[in-house]
């Protein structure tokens, strides 16, 4: 009778995702993953393959469960301009003392791995493209509803908003200053006219 896994794969993957998200790929050892997940090294290897495969599965989980879900929720529940503001503001929230600021897992991966890991880079690029498309849809919808002026170039402005979002994700970790981050949000939203 084959050995049966006695753990919830999704919960273990979530714990691995949290470890990679907070520490990065290189700084997260297999021992850290064993400690964080509570699963022995052999079971992790047997279930997920190597560390890189576990990392990529974690990145996919983040993209599906956090990024895509957040965009869908904003798109369905907020007017276009407010949806843009809320997404940007998510990255401008300054953490309280002692509270860990992990930033954006996708942006962290872009900075650490995308240049030399084509598969990780492809996941990041696809997510960034979808965020850009979200901004473009919000601009077009806002123009249709009369809330965003027709003279705002949807594609060009969406790209600028994506750059502002990525900048916020980086600055929220390196310079988590409320005034700086909120100023960037206001400047970015101001591009909507």
Image: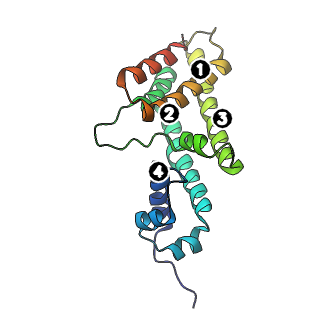
Taking depth in this image into account, of 129 and 141 the one nearest to the observer is: 129
Quadrant of image for the N terminus: bottom right
Of marks 4 and 1, the one in the foreground: 4
Instruction: Work out whether 82 lies above or below 94.
Output: above
Q: Which residue is mark 2?
A: 170
- What percent of the width, then of the height, locates residue 75? 52, 32
Instruction: Say which mark, if any, is on residue 129.
Output: 3
Asked which secondary structure carries label 4, the reply is helix
Which of the 4 quarters of the picture holds residue 129?
top right
Among the two numbered marks 4 and 1 on one chain, the one whose residue lies closer to the N terminus: 4
Residue at horizontal 58%, vertical 9%? Answer: 149
- What percent of the width, then of the height, locates residue 25? 55, 53
Contact, mark 1 vs mark 3 (Cβ under 8 Å): no
Among the two numbered marks 4 and 3 on one chain, the one whose residue lies closer to the N terminus: 4
Q: Which residue is mark 1?
A: 139
Q: CA distance from mark 4 to mark 3?
A: 25 Å
Taking depth in this image into account, of 179 and 123 the one nearest to the observer is: 179
Q: CA distance from mark 4 to mark 1?
A: 35 Å
Of marks 3 and 2, the one in the foreground: 2
Among the two numbered marks 2 and 4 on one chain, the one whose residue lies closer to the N terminus: 4
Asked which secondary structure carries label 3, the reply is helix
Q: CA distance from mark 1 to mark 3?
A: 15 Å
- What percent of the width, then of the height, locates residue 58? 54, 55
Instruction: Work out whether 105 lies above or below 18.
Output: above
Of marks 2 and 1, the one in the foreground: 2
Asked which secondary structure carries label 2, the reply is helix
Density class for disc 4 (Cα within 10 Å; few <14, some 14-19, many ≥20) is: some
Taking depth in this image into account, of 123 and 102 the one nearest to the observer is: 102
Q: Which residue is mark 4?
A: 23
């Amino acid at each position: 009778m084959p050995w049966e896994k006695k753990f919830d794969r999704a919960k273990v993957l979530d714990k691995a995702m949290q470890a990679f998200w907070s520490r990065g790929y290189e700084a997260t050892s297999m021992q850290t993953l064993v400690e964080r997940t509570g699963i022995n090294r052999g079971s992790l290897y047997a279930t997920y393959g190597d560390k890189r495969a576990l990392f990529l599965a974690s990145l996919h989980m983040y993209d599906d469960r956090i990024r895509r879900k957040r965009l869908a929720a904003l798109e369905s529940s907020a007017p276009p301009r407010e949806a843009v503001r809320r997404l940007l503001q998510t990255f401008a929230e300054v953490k309280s003392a002692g509270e860990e600021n992990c930033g954006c897992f996708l942006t962290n991966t872009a900075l650490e791995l995308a240049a030399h890991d084509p598969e990780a880079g492809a996941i990041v690029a696809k997510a960034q493209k979808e965020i850009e498309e979200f901004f473009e849809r919000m601009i077009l919808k806002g123009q249709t509803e009369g809330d965003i002026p027709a003279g705002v170039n949807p594609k060009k402005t969406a790209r600028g908003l994506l750059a502002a979002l990525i900048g916020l994700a980086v600055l929220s970790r390196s310079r988590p200053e409320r005034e700086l981050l909120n100023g960037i949000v206001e400047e970015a939203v101001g591009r909507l006219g």
